[in-house]
Structure formats: structure tokens, C-alpha cells
Amino acid sequence: MADFHVLAGSDQKLHFPAVRRIGFSDLTAALAEGWRDFWAKPSHLVFLGVIYPLVGGALGLWTSGANAWPMLYPLLSGFALLGPLAALPLYEMSRRQELGLETTWRSAFGVLTSPAIPSIAAIGLMLLVIFTIWLGLAQYLYESTFGIGSPASLAEFLNEVLGTPEGMTLMIWGNAAGLILAVIVLATSLISIPLLLDRDVGAAVAVQTSVRAVLRNPATTAAWGLIVLGLLVLGSLPLLVGLAVVVPVLGHATWHLYRRLVQPEA
């Protein structure tokens, strides 16, 4: 365990990569390259992307069986907060395609042997904490509005939320809280995990670099966040099945966005 490191790189020093200013054309270019990578190995990437609709369906069945309908939307939407970590194999596949290496899904999971895994796990733990905070906030807001307990059916729950003034208040405050947490996740993990795959700089430097990239490109990264949100919503509409394509494309596009945001090593 002598080489175990998290906050800094393997040499225990802080190396801060330089970040660039990018434009909206870089977003469309990153998406195009993400689609190119997806199309190069669609069967393997769909295999990875199907995880999302399967998890979504499992969450729906669990909340229906446990009479926990108020937690269905927080669970489904909050799952996106863990997206940067879940997309780790997709980043690796883009990296391997870039280097001309084998890009099967089995080789993608070889990323688990990366020396930066402790740092990636630290960022994953941070995302998990944010996800847990979101679930706690959602539960608190619902119980503060409607009291403890859960409606007996989905129809009754939807009538509560969509058909009453209290439900509108719940949606406003709930979405506001979710937006704040989503901005935190976007700023800290936009490129931190791709950076760690490319350079083992440590979790602290990776998060700091991601925040610097967002602060240098506020309008562009805000637009990227809206693009991601829009595509996830579109992919969710046909019973979450569209996420099997949307998620891999976004994962690959994020790798190429990282390449545009962070200046390469000399």
C-alpha cells in the first residue's frame, strides 16, 4: 500500500492542469464525437447503457411495492447525480479508442486496475453523500408538506402533487433544492473523473480543476448542463429505454469535452 494516494498524485505533489476557454461550438463537437464513439462499438455501449433503464424499472417496482411513491421521483432524478461515476467505463472506452487500444466492454472494466482508482472512489463517495442528502431533503419536504406516510397508489400520489396547492409548493422547493445539488455535482465532477483517468493528479486537484473549468466557462458549462438534462429527459420518456443510447453518448461526449477544457501535458 506504499503507493496508495487520494488527495494528490502518486508523487504526493499537487500538479494543477491548465484549463481553456471553450465556446458553444465545442459542445456540439463533443456531442458529435460522443456519437462517433458510440457508433464505433454500439453493442457494447448499449450493454452498459441498459443498466440505467433496468435500475429505473427496479426503483419503480420497489417504490410501488413498499408504498413509497413520494421517493420514486427523487430516486430516479437523483440517480443522475451518480452519473459521472457510473460513466467511468464509458470514459475509459473513449480513452482507449483515442489510443487505438482494444475497446470491448470487458477491456473497459479494466479501468478498475487504474492507479487513480482510490482518487476516483473518493469522488464517488462525495457524489454518494450528495445523493443521500438529496433523498433526505426530498423526504423532509414531502413530510413537511403532506405529513408522515405515503399514498396507497401512484394515482393518489400524483393527485396530491399535481392537483393541490401544497403539491405545487412541494415541486417548487424540491426542484430548487435539486437544482442546487445538481450545480454542485456539475462543478465538481464535470471533468474530474476523466482527468484522473488521463493523469493521476489526485482527487483534490481533479475537483479543483473541474471547478476552475466551470468558473472560466460559466455560460458554456451551464449550456452543457441544460443539454445533458434535456437529453436525459428525452431518453426517459419511452419508459427509460432511450437512456440506453443517451447515456453512452453523453459519457463519451464528456470525455471529449474534457479534452477541450484541459490543456494537454507538455
Image (cartoon, grey):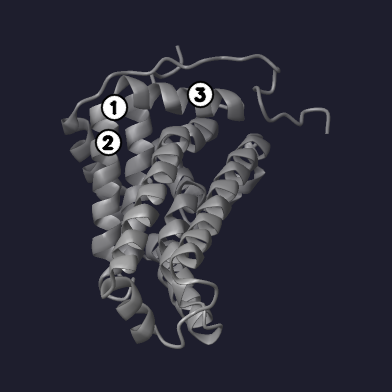
Q: Is residue 199 above or below residue 139?
A: above
- Image quarter of residue 5: top right
Q: In this view of the protein, can residue 67 be seen by the observer?
A: yes
- Residue in front for this viewpoint, 193 or 252: 193
Distance in Å between CA atoms under marks 1 and 2: 6 Å
* Disc sitting over residue 218 in the figure: 1
Q: Is residue 26 left or right of residue 239?
A: left
Residue under circle 3?
208
Is label 3 in contact with label 2 (beta carbons under 8 Å)?
no
Instruction: Please give left or right for residue 149 compared with residue 221 in the image.
Output: right
Quadrant in which the C terminus appears? top left
Up-down relation of residue 210 to residue 13 (above or below): below
Are the residues flagged by discs 1 and 2 in contact, CB closer than 8 Å? yes
Q: Position of residue 33 (x, y in %)?
A: 26, 42
Kindly identify the amino acid type of the residue bearing the numbered disc 3.
Gln
Q: For the point 52% across and 48% down, which residue is it?
A: 85
Find out whether the residues at labels 1 and 3 contact each other: C-beta distance under 8 Å: no
Above or below residue 126? Residue 165 is below
Instruction: Give the mark count.
Output: 3
- Tag 2 secondary structure: helix
Neighbours of disc 1 within 10 Å: few (<14), some (14-19), many (20+): some
Query: Label 2, on which residue?
Result: 222
- Residue 57: image quadrant is bottom left
Q: Determine which of the numbered discs, if any, sits on residue 56 in the image.
A: none
Q: Residues within 10 Å of mark 3 (few under 14, many from 20)?
A: some
| Residue type at tag 2 | Ala
- The answer for how far apart the CA atoms under marks 3 and 2 are is 18 Å
Q: Disc 1 and disc 3: Cα gap in Å?
A: 15 Å
Tell me which numbered mark, 1 or 3, is placed earlier along the sequence: 3
Q: Position of residue 16 (x, y in %)?
A: 51, 15
Q: Position of residue 47 (x, y in %)?
A: 43, 66
Q: What kind of element bears circle 3?
A: helix
